[in-house]
Structure formats: C-alpha cells, structure tokens
Image: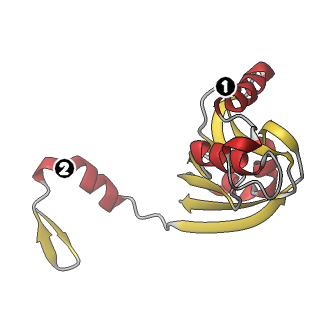
Amino acid sequence: MVRIKDKWLDVSSHSKTILHLLSYQQKMTVFQKEFSLKPRNRGFHLITREILQQVPEVAKMNAGIMQVFIQHTSAGLTINENADPTVRTDFETFFNRTVPEDISLYEHTLEGTDDMTSHIKSSLLGSSVSIPITNGELNLGTWQGIYLCEHRNRGGSRKIVVTLIGT
C-alpha cells in the first residue's frame, strides 16, 4: 500500500515502478517554440540539425520527449535513415509511383497537379514525430534522422511547432 494525497492505493503488482516514480521528484518542464523552415523543393530533406539549432533547450533536459509538428497539409514528417542519400531518393520515387500526379484522378486540383497528391502523401506519412530525449540529446538510433517530406513541386517555408516535455 502507498499513500498518495491522503489516499491509500494497492500497488503490489507495480511496486517498483510506483516507488521509483514517487522518489523521482524533479520538476517537469514544458517548453514550446514555433519557427519556419526555409523553403525547399519537392523531396525528402533531413532537418534534424535545423530543428536542434532552433531548439537548444533540448540540451538542458535529462529525460523527456520532443514532439515535432508541421502546420501544413501538403508536407509531412517522418524518421528514417540519415546516412545514405539514396534512401531519400527512393522514398520520393516510391511515393510518386504510389500516388501518381495524374490530374484526371482527382477533383481537388485548383493549385496544380501536385495539389491533391501532396495531401494524400502527407496523410500517409503524418504531421508529427516524437523522439525521446536522454541526457540532453535526442535518443535517435545510429542511422536515424528527422525528415521534412515536401510533396509540393515548389514548397514554401514550412511552419513547425516543437514541444519539449521532461525534466
């Protein structure tokens, strides 16, 4: 039994976890920053360094999560290999074959042949990624990086919101 705020809880099956959490009394920090990425042409672009330059507060966190969100519907974010640039080329080729730019296939084409296809690709990849923070660094795998997935032929600057939660 553990007492939390004048209530007794049976935590026998989770005692190690609960006791660790109770003994860990560092203050939780929440930090948020909005900024724009420079315009890029269509493709998959590594943006890990650019994000870290914008959010040096990562280095002050012992443990936490960084969430990166893109405020657009025609570009997405993902995490994948950061070493071999042919991975990014192959991603672009795959998505172009999977979602062809054939204007006869779509109704939403007011902004051009890459209009609806960009929305579909963005939905497939998603608009956010979350990365653990450990000892002031992103806890990515050896070959992992954050990608901006730009699906417009001439994408403009892209608005990003980064939220840090941790200690």
Q: In this figure, which residue is indicated by the disc labeled 1?
A: 143
Q: Residues within 10 Å of mark 2 (few under 14, many from 20)?
A: few
- Locate residue 148: give its quadrant: top right
In x, y percent, where is residue 40? Answer: 88, 46
Give the structural element (helix, strand or loop) at label 1. Answer: loop
Compared to 4, does 63 lie above or below? above
State the residue in front, 131 or 39: 39
**Label whose residue precedes the other's in the sequence (2 or 1):** 2
Where the N terminus falls, by quadrant?
Answer: bottom left
What residue is drawn where x is 68% and y is 48%? 106
Residue 145 placement, left or right of 39: left
Q: Which mark is residue 70?
A: none
Q: Residue at x 75, y 30 (%)?
A: 92
Residue 134 visible in the picture: no
Look at the picture and state if 167 lies above or below 7: above
12 vs 91, left or right, is left
Task: Give the side of residue 43 with respect to residue 100, left or right.
Answer: right
Residue type, mark 1 in image: Trp
At horizontal 31% and vertical 61% (from top left) the residue drawn is 22
What is the C-alpha distance between the residues marked 2 and 1? 35 Å
For the residue pair 147 and 151, the one nearer the viewer reads as 151
- Between 99 and 160, which is closer to the camera in this rendering? 99
In what element is the residue under mark 2? helix
Residue on which disc 2 sits: 14
- Residue 77 percent across, percent down from the top left: 67, 46
Amino acid type, residue under disc 2 in the picture: His
